[in-house]
Amino acid sequence: MPSKQIRKQSVSVTRGARKRDEDSGTDVGEGTDEWAQSKATVRPPDQLELTDAELKEEFTRILTANNPHAPQNIVRYSFKEGTYKLIGFVNQMAVHFSQVGNLIPKDSDEGRRQHYRDELVAGSQESIKVVTSDTENLEEEEEPKEGEAEAEAEAGSQTDVPAAAEITEKVIEEELMAPVQPKERKLTNQFNFSERASQTFNNPLRDRECQMEPPPRTNFSATANQWEIYDAYVDELEKQEKTKEKEKTKTPVAKKTEKMAMRKLTSMESQSDDITKVTQAAKIVERMVNQNTYDDVAQDFKYYEDAADEYRDQEGTLLPLWKFQNDKAKRLAVTALCWNPKYKDLFAVGHGSYDFMKQSRGMLLLYSMKNPSFPEYMFSSESGIMCLDMHVDHPYLVVVGYYDGNVAIYNLKKPHSQPCFRSTSKSGKHTDPVWQVKWQKDDMDHNLNFFSVSSDGRIVSWTLVKSELVHIDVIKLKVEGSTTEIPEGLQLHTVGCGTAFDFHKEIDYMFLVGTEEGKIYKCSKSYSSQFLDTYDAHNMAVDAVLWNPYHTKVFMSCSSDWTVKIWDHTIKTPMFIYDLNSAVGDVAWAPYSSTVFAAVTTDGKEKKGQEVQKGPAVEIAKFDKLLNLVREVKTKP
């Protein structure tokens, strides 16, 4: 057997080499004396020379876990308190190295497959080792019997090793081809919940408590006898008889109207129960759709500039943006406008009619620029609305003045369409249309109040006391020099018709009143019988009077006599007069400048396709109209 001879020779060679090394006596550990020698310290030439005391001195350094680069002044907004607060705890952890790995959990399907493959490979390798070790043992047992049958041993050894290898390979293939059966894992719950630990900040515990005064208690005791029970039954019978008598006196038409009204209320309530569930969501969706629809208009509102304005002398252009309209208010005129002082996109519109012969109904609509297609709030009234105003501190309260002389307050928080407060003939309503209403500061008892002016010559202060409107006549307008004496010794005064008023920005008790006679009166809340001053302002009715928001002495007035005048209330003659060649309906000071104002005239603007009459006859008629106005003024006594 050649293989056995080669192995024996190699063993003998190595043994002989070891013996020759031992016989030669060569030292294997050559060079060990160099390491046993003492080591000398080598100092650099620039090293400091320190004494023993300096060397023994200790410098202590305290190592902390704080990050020196962590910020110490982080401020965040607290929605609970509404202010910015300093954060006391800052994360001190600093990450020096991070690497994204591709680790697979052992409990996952892929992890179980890989683990099973590793076990199979490890088992196959062990089986191969076992087979090879068995063949070697057989060879060693046959070595003493070399002389008996060497050829047979060689043939047996050559045939046994491949057979064992083939068997192991078949076993491995069968195990790999067998379907993998994962071990059953007990689920935590039916949703296959996996537990993963995480480290988070522990929120501090908070205790909320409230303390209130106990409600008042009273002890009540009474005894009931037969007479008291009898009297209670008699009172109940009397009430029932009275209600029956009232129903008999009613006409059948009135009964039908009451039944119809009750049916409408019940139907509206049933519908509202179904609609109120989706009202808020539908309103939000409607606003989103309209914002997408009117996106171009919003962009023009912010950034539009007409390049052609540079070539126009003292003239500009107006670009129509939004158009607000409602089918229920088509035949009604717009009589009042007011922006909400808190919500800048919300404004109120009053609808009515200035024509005395065409008085019907009125409407109060509140629009938002976020939804131009439909009003946010809608209220209807029996009389036309002539004026309105919104409270500064309570923007949900809207006061209106009607054509029939009444005033009312609407609360936007309450869903019903009727006003919360309304004046009546018993509570001091005006006898003529109310031309202006204005909220004022709360009184000494913190009650809400507002003022109103009407053509009946009364300036009335209205106060909200509990659930009713209380009125006080501040002043009654009288035309000076118009008193006539009656034979009975009485005096008749001609009443001045108030059209507009405005309160001083700093002096609360002083206010101005404009009249249809063209007069402007400076009045005070403290004096109800006389005026502080009188201005012969205009030749026709005063349409608006307004204090300057910056200069406390200056006010402005406009009239149907085509003029706008600027006054100093200490001087009875105007400082500036502007003739606009048309009746001026309203004026307003600019909120950003004390010397800029805007005015609105009644001549309007030419529309596309509108035929405008021109020629000498039209111009002569216009001038004759102006001359007649001047003649009427001169002929007055």
Image: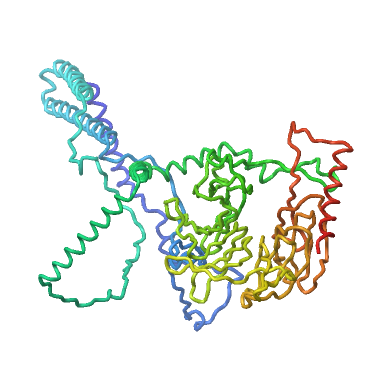
Position of the C terminus, as image quadrant, is bottom right
Q: Residue furthest front?
A: 487
In the rendered image, residue 271, in percent from the top left (x then y), is placed at 36, 41
User: Which quarter of the picture shows residue 209?
Assistant: bottom left
Residue 273 visible in the shown view: no
User: Which quarter of the picture shows residue 131?
Assistant: top left
Residue in front for this viewpoint, 389 or 205: 389
Image check: 229 left or right of 533?
left
The residue depicted at 23 percent of the width and 77 percent of the height is: 218
In the rendered image, residue 353, in percent from the top left (x then y), is placed at 61, 47
Position of the N terminus, as image quadrant, is top left
> Total marks drawn?
0
In the rendered image, residue 52, in percent from the top left (x then y), is placed at 50, 82
The residue depicted at 53 percent of the width and 73 percent of the height is: 443
Compared with 70, 148 (above or below) is: above
Residue in front for this viewpoint, 186 or 115: 186
Compared with 525, 25 (above or below) is: above
